[in-house]
Image (cartoon, coloured by chain):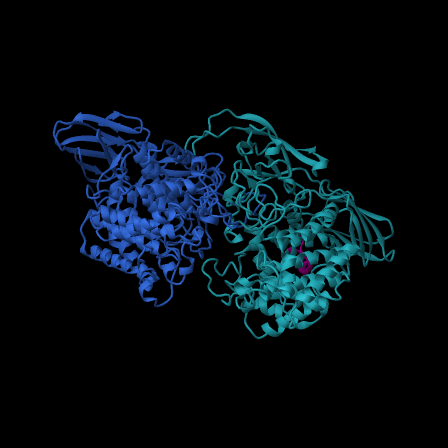
Chain colours: A blue, B cyan
Amino acid sequence: MNGPAVPTTGSLHPLGLDAVTLDPERLLGAWQERNAEQTLPHCTEQLERAGNIDNLRRVSTTDGAFRGMWFADSDVYKTLEAAAWELGRRSDPRLRAYLDETVTLLENAQDDDGYLNSYFQTDHRDQQWAELVWSHELYCAGHLIQAAVAAERAGAGERLLPLARRFADLLVTRFSTIDGVCGHPEIETALVELYRVTGHRPYLDLAARFVDLRGRGLLGDEPRFGARYYQDHEPVRDADEVTGHAVRQLYLLAGVVDVAVETEDASLLKAATRLWESAFDTKTYLTGAHGSRHRDEAFGDPYELPPDRAYAETCAAIASFSWNWRMLLATGGHRYADELERVLYNGIAGSTALDGRHYFYSNPLQLRTGHDGSHEDAPSQRLSWYSCACCPPNLARLLASLQCYVATTTDAGVQLHLYAQGHLGTPHGELGVSTDYPWDGQVTVTVTPSEPGTTWTLALRIPGWCTSPTLDGAPVSGGYAEVTRAWQPGDTVRLELPMPPRVVAAHPRVDAVRGCVALVRGPLVYCLEQADLPADVLVDDVRVDAAAPVTVAAGAEDQGAPVVLRLDGHHRASDTTPLYGAPPTTAETDVVLTAVPYFLWANRSPGAMRVWIPAR
Amino acid sequence: MNGPAVPTTGSLHPLGLDAVTLDPERLLGAWQERNAEQTLPHCTEQLERAGNIDNLRRVSTTDGAFRGMWFADSDVYKTLEAAAWELGRRSDPRLRAYLDETVTLLENAQDDDGYLNSYFQTDHRDQQWAELVWSHELYCAGHLIQAAVAAERAGAGERLLPLARRFADLLVTRFSTIDGVCGHPEIETALVELYRVTGHRPYLDLAARFVDLRGRGLLGDEPRFGARYYQDHEPVRDADEVTGHAVRQLYLLAGVVDVAVETEDASLLKAATRLWESAFDTKTYLTGAHGSRHRDEAFGDPYELPPDRAYAETCAAIASFSWNWRMLLATGGHRYADELERVLYNGIAGSTALDGRHYFYSNPLQLRTGHDGSHEDAPSQRLSWYSCACCPPNLARLLASLQCYVATTTDAGVQLHLYAQGHLGTPHGELGVSTDYPWDGQVTVTVTPSEPGTTWTLALRIPGWCTSPTLDGAPVSGGYAEVTRAWQPGDTVRLELPMPPRVVAAHPRVDAVRGCVALVRGPLVYCLEQADLPADVLVDDVRVDAAAPVTVAAGAEDQGAPVVLRLDGHHRASDTTPLYGAPPTTAETDVVLTAVPYFLWANRSPGAMRVWIPAR
């Protein structure tokens, strides 16, 4: 049983789906448990309610009207993928039945030649393959393939994998000679994963072909969105700036790394690395999120990172996670694991409500008093579903496979990337991890080696945010602290990652947060919420001293925040201040501020929020 | 001959089209001349090239395919309106021929019942009146009516006015009983203007009806844009916040004031005033522009005013000008004249290149180094035309009637609102205005009264930005300085409006420009451009001391900037600075900064620009 994105080459190897158990009493395990108990069932219910399942039924029955987005099938596939990952970590007859029923539905809908897309099979047969720039046909096919790969790795792919292969074989037949790419990347990474579970080289070759066909004008010169939107503005190998629709860009880059690794194409990996630097040096939010513009759901210019109008789509955060995971596996570079952690605890985690059944599509870093929440992509609180419901099932599939991302293995040993209490089975031995991370920085690893006395290396990531880490009491530095020894049963290693609150500022070119500071502790970004302030002290009118001491305090456990931050702030009402010219003249008053983890925002009464706080 | 928006009631009365002559050697007159010689001919050429004229020809011939936006007729009407205003201030056989030919084209295209819309008359006859939310049919009708009103006031409406009335009569017949409003306001103000030139009350009644039908859900619950976009989210009388698509909101408000004035509806004018305060207290750029979001071309939340992603559509600036003009006529309030001036010299003027033939659709207050200029609505330089070409003809019609907005009259005297060298004929006498405004604040008015010795009042606006105005050497204050006397030929009045450079900051809630200052002199906003800096000193990396003295210097007359500003600044390269955490460590160097008027930006080599400059 393998998890997502298992390379046949590359430097690190993931552990299997059933190799890692996360403790449901601790944060990552609790998120995974909530996903299984709330989010995944919610997705299956909503897919039925919103018509996605009926759309597929219609292919046989032709009853009713097609409902939702034309790429609505993809949400069924992502939910199916989530169910498959769940089945890979625990048996569940109900989930297994869901998977089987859905596969039956898909089998009934699939054309004889392997084609499957309920939108084009019903009312739009004449448009099949006619307009790749908008059709999402290859995108949907990609998500079907990813579901099949997950099912196969979970031991439940006996019918879904052949079904997906029939479609993939059709794609190979059709697109090995026709020059065409999808307006929405996704098929690339899916085909490589299919190659990985089948060993069938034409899938990899087609993925490589799709990557190399980009930037050649195949998607036409659509004026409203432009070639960047569709990732068709320049060849991937020439690109040096992430741009256009963020999810499209990041899905493509996940596929690019997959192709680079499997074809051992160093120049392609070099392009991905260059684009990574563009993204993470100039276009990433403090929460790890991407996408600065609502218009086109797109990356902005370098340093264009407005907190209020951050698009920061949940799917883009998940895509960034997938891309960084692949970069980590390909290179072993710690900076990729740092980004996995940052986006997981902030950009991704913030999208889901405490109840697991409400979600943000867009994840801004600021919400003003008086915000117009009438738009679906900028609501004041999480919604239970979306007209374009790509994000919730994407969360479900990531969280269902979350245990796969905490560690990797090589012939030389085991690498711990994310710290979470739980148990790991590796080729080198069993590892028990004891920690309350991210609330506390102590991590104790107890080793039971497969063969006592064998020498191998346990590598523990030192997060980039940590300035004074110690391993068994001794200072360590660098990306990974390594312990090489002849391991005996019961050996322990104790990593200490002190996490005092940090007050951070942004690059001076990030104009949108000039003169502001943000509060961070460990991997968690914190924020101020109106809910923690008196009604007459608007969060919009609060300032802090940049040098004000920030203290750690106990928060409300039942609201998911065992650790909050406190600091002294200042408040000055500004309602009557003119827009330009005179500064506010009302007296400034002191106020004690409480900051809560960003991922918990908007779980209480609706109200203003800000990550970046003006500093005096 | 009357100019735009002549109320039958209200407090101030505009002068006629031929009553004012602006000196073409001075700024406003030069803009009007450039409009006549470059912009208007450019528009007529482009309308032919882009297919707008062919679309109308097709109604009779059905040759070829419809080209451009479905509301492309409106650009023909706005250009026609511009030609009419031009004919009102000077005779021009070529323009007269253009007007006549175009009217012939329209006469040939118009249906027997008065309907006229080349998109719906050709390939989309079945959709006529079927979908008001998107059709722009009433919007286009409104622009046709406005063109006819202009022609009539210019003495050239003998065929165009009856043509427009046939359409307007059809609207009255159809919509006096059917509940329906247009997704894009414009018909409201047009119908009131038509009432003003015809005295035909049903036009006014229909306009009032259209205003009152808004906010009642007649445009349906379109989820992608939402009711605010179409101005259908709440009844106008209840609204207290400008919101949604900025041009739609502002066109509607111009119509609201027109209806309020003509129906003497105080509650409606009160709503317009409340919305004015929402706009100008919390949602207006320093340049007077409106629209903070590219998404939906919309107003943002209060204080959401990003300089880089300012949409600041040229048409919204023109709409704001029209709205403020109507508020001024209705109330005589100086704040409306202040806004006329601000938006004219900055938000509107900045849209046109020095050559008069290139235009910005969107007018940001910042352009970064490395900006992606591939999008039509965020190019790095002005374009010669747009796929949605609403703005250039809108500029043409405003500039062609610019002389109408400098002054008004009442029984009690004459009011000067905008200062421009030229000559005014008023019922009370002739006024010669001598000034180099806005480069210099001296304004001398020489009066030749119609009846020497008659007492009347000359009121001169004291701009809100001016802190030490004098009239004939004596300090004055308030919105207007009034001179009441028994005027004799040759009497002069000398207004002195000192315009030292001002360093302004924004309201502390305008997060996007926190810690920045802007340079303003008189009514002109200034900006820094890369073109004035060495190549290794990026404008993105420049700071100033908020208290640094700003000096006035002579600029390049041939580049349209006789007055520039100079101040000492500091530069620190930040290319290698991490995105979050450590501040840049390279040494700061001194640099002398030159600021040019914002309206002149992007007339030299393409490059970065910023209005708001970070302050130390």
Q: Which picture quadrant has residue B520?
A: top right
User: Which of the two residues, B64 or A459, is positioned nearer the viewer here?
Assistant: B64
Where's residue B171, x and y in %? Answer: 62, 70
Which quarter of the image is occupied by the N terminus of chain A? Answer: top left
User: Which of the two residues, B278 or B583, is positioned nearer the viewer here?
Assistant: B583
Tally the numbered discs: 0
Which residue is at a point 46% across and 58% down the rendered structure image? B224
**Does residue A596 lie above or below B260 as drawn?**
above
Asked if one can make out residue A605 in the rendered structure from this viewpoint, the answer is: yes
**Does residue A100 lie above or below A451 as drawn?**
below
User: Which of the two residues, B170 or A569, is positioned nearer the viewer here?
Assistant: B170
Where's residue B593, x and y in %? Answer: 61, 31
Residue B180 in the figure: left or right of residue A59: right
Which residue is at a point 46% across and 64% down the rendered structure image? B221
Main SS of the magenta segment? helix
Q: Which residues are magenta?
A: B324-335
Q: Which picture quadrant has residue A11?
A: top left
Residue B474 in the figure: left or right of residue B597: right
Residue A415 in the figure: left or right of residue A174: left
Residue B325: say if magenta: yes
Where's residue B372, x and y in %? Answer: 52, 40
